[in-house]
Amino acid sequence: LEIIDTEYSVRTALSLIEKGSMLIDIVDPAVLGIAPKIDGTNKMYSQYGLGLVAIFLPIVSLGKIVAIFFNIDQRIIIDFLLSFYNVPFAILGLYFFRSILVQLGTTQAKATTCMLLLFCCTGFWKYSVTDFSEITQACCLLAIVFHIIKKREKQWLHISFWFSALILIKLTYLIFLIPLLT
C-alpha cells in the first residue's frame, strides 16, 4: 500500500471483521494531537469515509481466509489483494466514459479511441494499480454523468446510488449537492 489514508480504511475493515468495532489503533502518532479522545481506550476512529471500508470489507475477509489456508501473515495477502481493488473501477470508469461519448453522438470507433487515449495518455493507468481512491471517485463521477445523459426509468435511483458512493468515499463531494438542494 502506498498511502497512509488506505491504512486507516484497512484497519477499520479489520477491526469491524475481528472485533465488530470501528475503533482502530493509532496509525500515525502525529494525529493524536487533533484526534478526539475516546474515554477508556487509546484507540481512535478513522477520519476517512466509510466508502473504502465498505469496498475493502470483502477483500479483507478474503485475504484473511487465504492467509489461513497458506499460513502466511494476513497483511501480506490483504495488501496484495487491495493493490488490485481499483482495476474493476478503472474498467467500469472507462466503460462509462466510452458510453458517454457514444450517447453524445461520437462514433463507436472514435469513442473507443478516446477511451484508449484516456487510459494510456493520462494518469488513469497509473492510478488503476494503486491504492489511491481517485480512480474509484472518477468511476463514480463518470457513472453519474452517464446516468444523467441516459434518460431512462429509475434514472435518479442510479444517480443517487453513485452519488452516495462518491460521498461515502470523500465527503468533499457533498459540496456539489448543496446547489441542487437550494
Image (cartoon, helix red, strand yellow):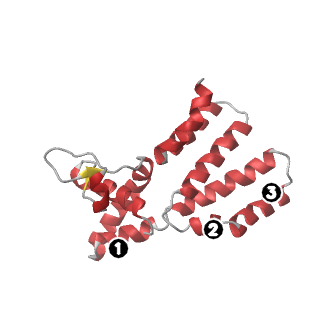
Which residue is painted at 61% across and 37% down in the image? 159
Report how far apart the C-alphas of labels 1 and 3 lie in the structure: 39 Å
Is residue 69 visible to the viewer in this orientation of the structure?
yes
Amino acid identity at mark 1 = Ile
Task: Look at mark 2 in the image and give the residue it sits on.
Answer: 125
- Establish if 52 lies above or below 129: above
Name the mark nearer the viewer: 1 or 2: 2
From the image, which quarter does the N terminus lie in? Answer: bottom left
Q: Going 31% across and 50% down the picture, which residue do you hit?
A: 34
Tell me which residue sits at (44%, 65%) in the image: 3
Dividing the picture into quadrants, the one containing residue 177 is top right
Q: Is residue 32 left or right of residue 8?
A: left
Q: Amino acid at mark 3?
A: Ala
Residue beneath label 1, please? Answer: 76
The local crowd at label 3, few if under 14, some if 14 to 19, many if 20 or more residues have their Cα within 10 Å, is many
Quadrant, the C terminus: top right
Q: Look at the picture and state if 115 lies above or below 67.
A: above
Q: Is residue 91 left or right of residue 30?
A: right
Residue at the extreme top of the image, as rendered: 182
Q: Residues within 10 Å of mark 1 (few under 14, many from 20)?
A: few
Compare residues 165 and 47 and report the one nearer the observer: 47
Please state which of residues 4 and 19 is positioned toward the viewer in this rendering: 4
